[in-house]
Image: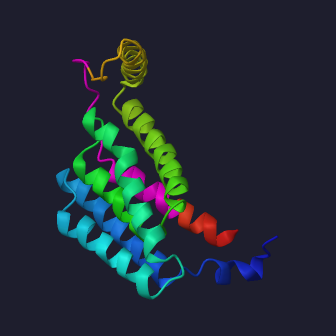
Amino acid sequence: MITLPDLPTRLLLSPADLLLAVLLVVAAVSDWRTYRIPNWLTMGGALVGLALNAFVTDVGVLRSLGGLGLGLVLLLPLWALRVLGAGDVKLMAMVGAFVGAPDVLVALAFSLIAGGIAAAGFALSRRKGLQMLRNVQETLVASVVTIAAGHAPSLGAMPSIGKLPYAIGICMGCVTWIIYRHLN
């Protein structure tokens, strides 16, 4: 159990976690303003994460490489379906390079939850909540049917509710997970 006097000490992030949080905020701001996440940020961040884990932290370079690979591979299908941009996929790979495998799976789960909440809020703010639900339903049904028929799923021409800079969801989810991890 955490007592109130222990809380400030428990919230002190490691330098690697603090750097990751800063990189995520920079990526979210960039995505918000330009709908782009620069390669120098994702690729450079991934290299820094690998280097930190190879020489400084106890994660280790193999777990770091595994996290990078998992972060990349797990979001590639969403990129292929044009649900996410390539920058979002590379950003999650960068997170994996910092946190390693299997921790990137938990960070991804937090990011998907935060992104879902952000998408729902985005749709509701534009009064397109029902359209979002119809799009999700049609996507799931079409994907199941095409996969059952032995074909690769693809998104049809559904009415868009707008473009959401998903780096914000990744940032919110990962930073929440980092803080949660430090508190427990």
- Frontmost residue, 55 versus 132: 55
Q: Is residue 184 magenta?
A: no
Figure check: 98 above or below 141: below
Question: Where is residue 93, by image quadrant?
Answer: bottom left
Q: Which residue is depicted at the point 40% across and 38% down?
A: 119
Relative to residue 130, is residue 104 depicted above or below?
below
Q: Is residue 48 above or below residue 136?
A: below
Q: Position of residue 145 (x, y in %)?
A: 39, 12
- Residue at left offset 21%, top offset 55%: 33
Q: In the visual, does 128 lie left or right of 176?
A: left
163 relative position to 22: left or right: left
- What x and y, as percent, mark residue 134? 40, 16
Q: Position of residue 75 (x, y in %)?
A: 36, 45
**Display colour scheme:** rainbow
- Specify the quadrant that holds the N terminus: bottom right
Q: Write the start and end of the magenta stretch as one range.
A: 156-175
Residue 51, by quadrant, is: bottom left
Give the tally of numbered discs: 0
Of 94 and 166, which appears nearest the observer? 94
Residue 164 sits inside the magenta stretch: yes
Residues 140 and 133: in front is 140
Task: Say which residue appears at 32% left-offset and 58% top-offset.
Answer: 91
Q: Is residue 67 left or right of residue 44?
A: right
How far across and down, in percent of the image, does residue 76 sit? Answer: 31, 43
Q: Residue at x 28, y 32 (%)?
A: 81
Looking at the picture, tell me which residue is in the foreground, 115 or 149: 149
Q: Quadrant of residue 120?
A: top left
Q: Quadrant of the C terminus?
A: bottom right
Position of 10 with respect to 93 (left or right) is: right
